[in-house]
């Protein structure tokens, strides 16, 4: 048995030497310099994989949206590569229907989770496409970039958002999307209901009136299934003119983290939640 053990040990030692794959020691060093959040916002499945990509030249340190600028520059200097410039990407919510403008048909009293509410019949909101306001997105955010406002709507802090995609995954109604900050034109609604029906459920819903499409450069905005849809392949044509005649303010312009509505948008002064209005039809 002793001889057999010695032979097997020798075989393993020989195999380890022959099959050993050399790993660049700089990978460990770069991994230690990264934030260790493993958020995936850089496009890699984790910080280790991103370090490997940086060392191999497949990725630039600047693709890490979590590291401070000083650290990405240090990594670039350490590797002797360009830091690279990546446009900031942020999460955006396709709903503006807080509880002061969007009607509730019933009171949801189940588990405090959007996903649970959807599974239990939709959560009681009149608009089937609207945000339920139970904060799954905020709970999922590890960067403190999402907070719920007084009307039960999640607000994204673009300065803190790293585009990790967690809120996109967490929302059971697919209301979040990741967009470059240069995509300033945005439809804050996902309702596919027809005009009057949409307004009956939410005062700030898109009614599909097509005024934005008429005012925007040709092809930039189309009305599909009663909803304005922006072709971001033509984003270079976008201007705030497209939002000006929107009667509900459903289409907005984002500038430096601030959301602007058009001059014709209905002014909402109500500060209290709407009462529950059961559907007796």
Image (tube, rainbow, N blue to C red):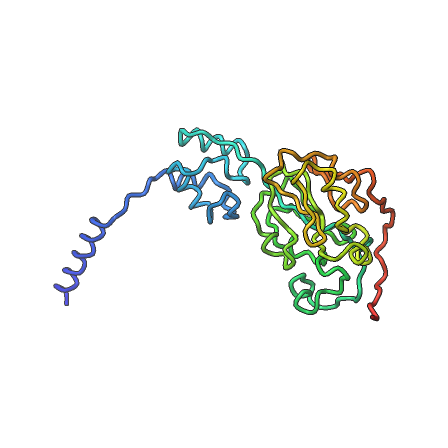
Q: Nearer the viewer, residue 84 or 194?
A: 194
Q: Nearer the viewer, residue 4 or 102?
A: 102
The answer to whether 244 is drawn above or below residue 195 in the figure is: above
Task: Please identify the quadrant where the N terminus is shown.
Answer: bottom left
174 vs 37, left or right, is right
Q: Residue 55: x percent and y percent?
A: 39, 37
Task: Please identify the quadrant where the C terminus is shown.
Answer: bottom right
Q: Residue at x 67, y 65 (%)?
A: 118
The answer to whether 22 is drawn above or below residue 134 in the figure is: above
Instruction: Answer yes or no: is residue 133 visible.
Output: no
Q: Residue 171: x percent and y percent?
A: 63, 56
Q: Residue 16: x percent and y percent?
A: 23, 52
Q: Residue at x 72, y 61 (%)?
A: 128
Q: Residue furthest left?
A: 3
- Counting the numbered discs, the total is 0
Q: Nearer the viewer, residue 85 or 149?
A: 85
61 vs 122, left or right, is left
98 vs 8, left or right, is right
Q: Residue 260: x percent and y percent?
A: 75, 38
Q: Residue furthest right?
A: 269
Instruction: Answer yes or no: is residue 128 visible.
Output: yes
Q: Nearer the viewer, residue 190 or 211?
A: 211
């Amino acid at each position: 048995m002793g001889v057999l053990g010695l032979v097997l040990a020798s075989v393993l030692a020989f195999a380890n030497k022959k099959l050993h794959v050399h790993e660049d020691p700089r990978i460990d060093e770069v991994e230690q310099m990264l934030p260790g959040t493993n958020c995936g916002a850089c496009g890699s499945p984790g910080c280790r994989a991103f370090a490997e990509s940086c060392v191999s030249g497949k990725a630039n340190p600047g693709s890490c949206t979590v590291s401070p600028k000083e650290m990405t520059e240090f990594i670039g200097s350490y590797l002797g590569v360009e830091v690279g410039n990546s446009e900031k990407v942020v999460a955006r919510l396709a709903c503006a229907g807080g509880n002061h403008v969007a009607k509730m048909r019933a009171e949801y009293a189940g588990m405090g989770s959007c996903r649970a509410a959807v599974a239990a019949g939709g959560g009681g909101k009149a608009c089937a496409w609207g945000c339920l306001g139970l904060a799954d997105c905020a709970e999922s955010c590890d960067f403190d970039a999402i907070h719920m406002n007084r009307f039960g709507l999640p607000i994204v802090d673009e300065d803190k958002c790293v585009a990790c995609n967690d809120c996109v995954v967490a929302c059971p109604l697919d209301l979040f999307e990741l967009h470059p900050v240069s995509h300033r034109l945005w439809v804050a609604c996902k309702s596919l209901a027809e005009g009057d029906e949409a307004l009956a459920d939410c005062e700030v819903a898109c009614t599909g009136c097509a005024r934005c499409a008429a005012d925007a450069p040709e092809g930039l905005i189309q009305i599909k299934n009663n909803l304005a849809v922006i072709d971001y392949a033509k984003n270079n044509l976008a201007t705030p003119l497209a939002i000006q005649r929107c009667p509900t303010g459903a289409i907005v312009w984002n500038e430096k983290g601030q959301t602007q509505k058009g001059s014709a948008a209905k002014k909402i002064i109500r500060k209290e939640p709407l009462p529950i209005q059961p559907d007796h039809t």
